[in-house]
Amino acid sequence: MGKAYLSEDQDGLLITDGVLSLRADFSAMRQRIRPGRLRSEILLRAAGIKGGRAIVPGDDGERPLRVADATAGLGEDALLLAAAGCEVLLFERDPVIAALLRDALRKAMLDEELQEAASRMTLREADSIAELPLLKGSVDVVLLDPMFPERQKSGLVGKKFQLLHLIEQPCADEAALFAAAEAAEPGRIAVKRPLKGPLLAGRRPDYALFGKAIRYDCYLYPEWKRG
Ligand SMILES: C[S@@+](CC[C@H](N)C(=O)[O-])C[C@H]1O[C@@H](n2cnc3c(N)ncnc32)[C@H](O)[C@@H]1O
């Protein structure tokens, strides 16, 4: 497979190597974000959401749970959280992936079934290692899902996602990413890992949740919990 490049057609932005193509599009997620299905998403439990409703007590009544998705990628995890009611700040440092994600958010705002969730998603094209410390005290949950080297070889990687991996670099700065997440002082950090993958930055979680192919390592910080 050669180099991938960014292109545009009537349906928006895509990356292609001339043979395969990949775009960011949430329309395939419409079923998954319906309340009955959404409630069973392991990600919601990893974020500490109970009963599928991401509302917490605030100063003046209730408020949405605030999540920083520090490794947004194509934004699917962020969409699940936003559909549950979270306000999600998405960080994506790769300009090509950020452009695809921005295009997915634009399309979602035109889609009746996706626009409510999309309206709770804010994208920042930036490195979360630099940005998370600036959020100190203002987020409840930080989600980390950096690419792991094994994923490149895994059977989980569909042909289309091989295109993404031409752009996306495996995470070389795990300790810095984890430290930045802690510097935001959230009540919880949730780390998505392959089922049997190593701990991120070697950090032992308070508990883990297991899905079929993935695992969430959950780190709790009761001293910083708000709401
Ligand atoms: C495995 S993907 C995340 C997939 C995402 N959870 C989803 O649902 O689509 C990891 C993404 O994190 C981005 N990333 C890694 N480190 C980052 C950082 N320090 N700041 C911002 N983005 C980062 C990569 O460019 C890549 O797009």
Image: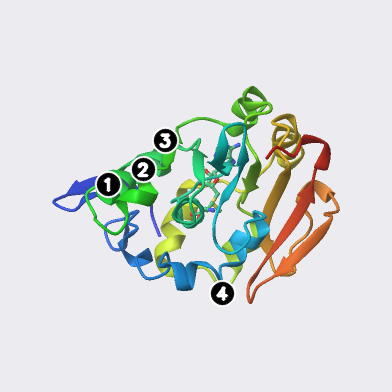
Q: What SS does tag 4 mark? A: loop
The x, y position of residue 181, in whole percent, is 70, 37
Q: What SS does tag 3 mark? A: helix
The x, y position of residue 170, in whole percent, is 61, 49
Measured Cα–Cα span from mark 1 to mark 2: 7 Å
Measured Cα–Cα span from mark 1 to mark 4: 33 Å
Residue 67: name its quadrant.
Answer: top right
Measured Cα–Cα span from mark 3 to mark 1: 21 Å
Dot 3 or dot 4, earlier in sequence: 3
At 63% from the left edge and 73% from the top edge, which residue is drawn?
A: 213
Residue underneath mark 4: 155
Residue underneath mark 3: 95
**Residue type marked 1:** Met
Which dot marks residue 189?
A: none
**Residue type marked 2:** Ser
Q: Residues within 10 Å of mark 3 (few under 14, many from 20)?
A: few
